[in-house]
Image (spheres, rainbow, N blue to C red):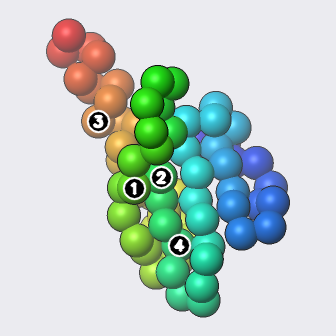
Amino acid sequence: MKWLPPYGMVQRSFCGRYAIQHPVENVWIAYSIPTVGEPAKLDECESDEKAKARCDHDERDLRALRRAG
């Protein structure tokens, strides 16, 4: 998944479906942003890379569910 450059404490995925917030040192919070409804907190991670990996994992799960239909 591609990511846009950070804007302040927030970084968004290029597709706009995920965001990572870095509110305090050593905490990155991964969010899923659905087309309809409220954003869902996926996890609190200890690094930017782990937060991005958590978003990637969620995206893979969603794709698998769509294929299983």
Q: Residue at x 36, y 64 (%)?
A: 43
Residue placed under numbered mark 1 in the picture: 41
Residue placed under numbered mark 3 in the picture: 61
- Horizontally, residue 30 falls left or right of residue 60, namely right
**Relative to 7, is 58 above or below?**
above
In space, the residues marked 4 and 3 are separated at their CA atoms by: 21 Å
Viewer-nearest residue: 42 or 2: 42
> x, y percentage for residue 41?
39, 55
- Contact between labelled residues 1 and 2, with CB atoms less than 8 Å apart: yes
Which amino acid does the dot numbered 1 rest on?
A: Lys
The disc, 4 or 1, on the residue closer to the chain's N-terminal end is 4
Closest to the camera, between mark 3 and mark 2, is 2
In space, the residues marked 1 and 3 are separated at their CA atoms by: 16 Å
- Horizontally, residue 56 falls left or right of residue 60, namely right
Q: Residue at x 34, y 25 (%)?
A: 63
Question: Residue 67 has which mark?
Answer: none
Residue placed under numbered mark 4 in the picture: 28
> x, y percentage for residue 65?
23, 23
Residue placed under numbered mark 2 in the picture: 31
Q: Callout 3: few (<14), some (14-19), or many (20+) C-alpha neighbours within 10 Å?
A: few
> x, y percentage for residue 32?
45, 44
Q: Residue at x 29, y 16 (%)?
A: 66
Closest to the camera, between mark 4 and mark 1, is 1
**Relative to 44, is 30 above or below?**
above
Closest to the camera, between mark 4 and mark 3, is 4
Which amino acid does the dot numbered 4 rest on?
A: Trp
